[in-house]
Amino acid sequence: MWRTDTLWFDVAMVMSIFAVGNILFGRFEEHRSRARRLAKPALFLAVILALSATVGRGWAYGVLALPLLAAAWVHIVWLPRHGVSGWTAEPRERYLELLRSRGQA
């Protein structure tokens, strides 16, 4: 009945990751526009599905793991080095200042 070798499983995996990410880390994206926050999962989903359908699921999940690893590094290493908590984004003013200086806000 349940199969894991379909593109629908890949859709479920990607959207589950985004759902958990929004629940746990949505406060880090509050400064972004709604259009950008809607486009991000759609773009990731399209890329992962295209990769899964063409070069294989292993490559698709490998590519999916790269932003997760990058986000972990930013929250665990980079933000604390710059005086911001990677878990709470506090002090908030410093966090937003860092984003503005990197052209991300």
Image: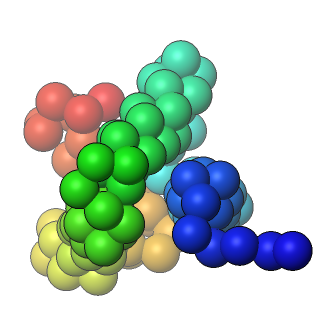
Q: Is residue 49 above or below residue 84?
A: above
Q: Position of residue 98 (x, y in %)?
A: 21, 47
Q: Quadrant of the N terminus?
A: bottom right
Residue that appears at 65% across and 53% down = 8
State the image quarter where residue 80 is shown. bottom left
Q: Is residue 78 left or right of residue 47?
A: left
In this orientation, which residue lies closer to the viewer: 93 or 23? Answer: 23
Q: Is residue 36 above or below residue 51?
A: above
Q: Is residue 17 left or right of residue 49?
A: right
Q: Is residue 33 left or right of residue 59?
A: right
Q: Is residue 89 left or right of residue 76?
A: right
In this orientation, which residue lies closer to the viewer: 63 or 89? Answer: 63
On the question of residue 18 being in view, the answer is: no
Residue that appears at 48% across and 52% down = 28
On the question of residue 92 being in view, the answer is: yes
In this orientation, which residue lies closer to the viewer: 45 or 97? Answer: 45
Q: Position of residue 86 (x, y in %)?
A: 38, 73
Residue that appears at 43% across and 36% down = 46
Q: Position of residue 47 (x, y in %)?
A: 34, 41
Q: Position of residue 94 (x, y in %)?
A: 30, 52
Q: How is the image coloured?
A: rainbow
Give the residue furthest to the front.
Answer: 1
Give the residue furthest to the right.
Answer: 1
In this orientation, which residue lies closer to the viewer: 53 or 97? Answer: 53
Q: Is residue 94 above or below residue 66?
A: above
